[in-house]
Each structure stands twice: as structure tokens, then as C-alpha cells.
Image (cartoon, rainbow, N blue to C red):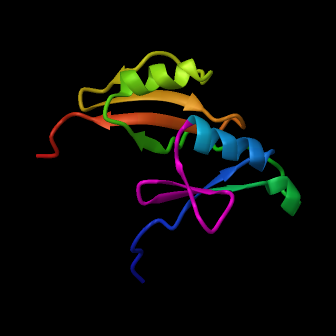
């Protein structure tokens, strides 16, 4: 067996239409032309699903922040704050990258990210 890629990242929601608006209108992810609740960040698909419609309990994804690449974390953070997104504190500088943590309307953890250090 060889795993060759990630097909999608599942994002649980209590309101798929609200999530769709957030991921498309607020974050600017590209909607999938074949799936109403699938959105793209580059080559990574995010798939919204409602666990409660399948008889499962809802719980937001915590502590596994998908790192959404932006060229300038500060500028992207300011843009999202102007749209009402609340961040968990200030921008973190790890010495390798900048990160800004926030959640979607269902409480799923997300991160703006930019690695500024060379991979060499």
C-alpha cells in the first residue's frame, strides 16, 4: 500500500449552508463545480458534512488546525477581522513561520500560515 495524497479534509458542521458561506464568501475558497459542500484551497479539498444527519454527535475539530497558506499573515488576519472573524490572540512567530489561529462558525480550528524560513 502506498498513500499518494489527501483526497479531502472533512469539516463537521451543524449548518452546511452557513459553513458554505463562510468557506466561500469569508475565506474565499474555490467552490467545487460538482459538490455544493466541497471547497478548494489550492489542491486541497475541504468537505463539509453534518454528523447529526447521520445519527452521530457533533463535535468540532480541535487542535489539528489546517494550515491555510497566505503570503502575509498580518494582512490576511486584518482582512478576515474586518469580515468579523475572531482570532485566538496575536500572530505567532515560531522562528520559522507566522501563524494566526481562528475558528469557523462551528468551532473548527483553522490557521493562517506562512513559512518564511528556507527549507534548506
Based on the displayed image, in which of its 4 quarters is residue 2 positioned? bottom left
The residue sitting at 45% across, 16% down in the picture is 90
The answer to whether residue 91 of the structure is visible from this angle is yes
Q: Report the side of 101 relative to 113 (left or right).
A: right
The residue most toward the top is: 90
Magenta-drawn stretch contains 43: yes
Q: Quadrant of residue 69?
A: top left
Measured as percent of width and height from the top left, residue 76 is found at 42, 27
Along the line of sight, which residue is nearer the eye, 112 or 72? 72
Considering every residue shown, the one lying at the far left of the view is 120
114 w.r.t. 2: above or below: above
**In the picture, which quadrant includes the N terminus?**
bottom left
Is 78 drawn above or below residue 2 in the view shown? above
Residue 105 position, x and y percent, is 70, 34
- For the record, the magenta segment spans 27-46
Which residue is drawn at the image coordinates 68% and 47% (left, top)?
20
In the foreground, 109 or 79? 79
Q: Position of residue 51 (x, y in %)?
A: 79, 55
Q: In screen coordinates, is 108 left or right of 50? A: left
Query: Which residue corresponds to the image point at 38% horizontal and 35% vertical from the top-left?
Result: 113
Q: Is residue 31 magenta?
A: yes
Where residue 5 appears, as percent x and y from the top left, is 42, 69
Q: Is residue 58 above or below residue 56?
A: above
Location of residue 43 by image quarter:
bottom left
Amino acid at each position: 500500500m502506498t498513500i499518494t495524497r489527501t483526497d479531502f479534509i472533512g469539516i463537521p458542521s451543524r449548518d452546511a449552508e452557513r459553513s458554505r458561506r463562510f468557506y466561500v464568501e469569508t475565506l474565499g475558497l474555490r467552490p467545487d463545480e460538482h459538490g455544493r459542500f466541497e471547497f478548494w484551497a489550492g489542491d486541497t479539498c475541504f468537505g463539509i458534512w453534518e454528523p447529526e444527519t447521520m445519527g452521530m454527535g457533533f463535535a468540532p475539530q480541535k487542535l489539528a488546525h489546517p494550515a491555510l497558506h497566505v503570503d502575509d499573515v498580518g494582512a490576511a488576519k486584518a482582512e478576515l477581522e474586518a469580515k468579523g472573524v475572531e482570532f485566538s490572540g496575536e500572530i505567532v512567530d515560531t522562528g520559522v513561520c507566522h501563524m494566526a489561529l481562528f475558528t469557523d462558525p462551528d468551532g473548527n480550528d483553522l490557521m493562517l500560515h506562512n513559512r518564511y524560513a528556507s527549507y534548506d
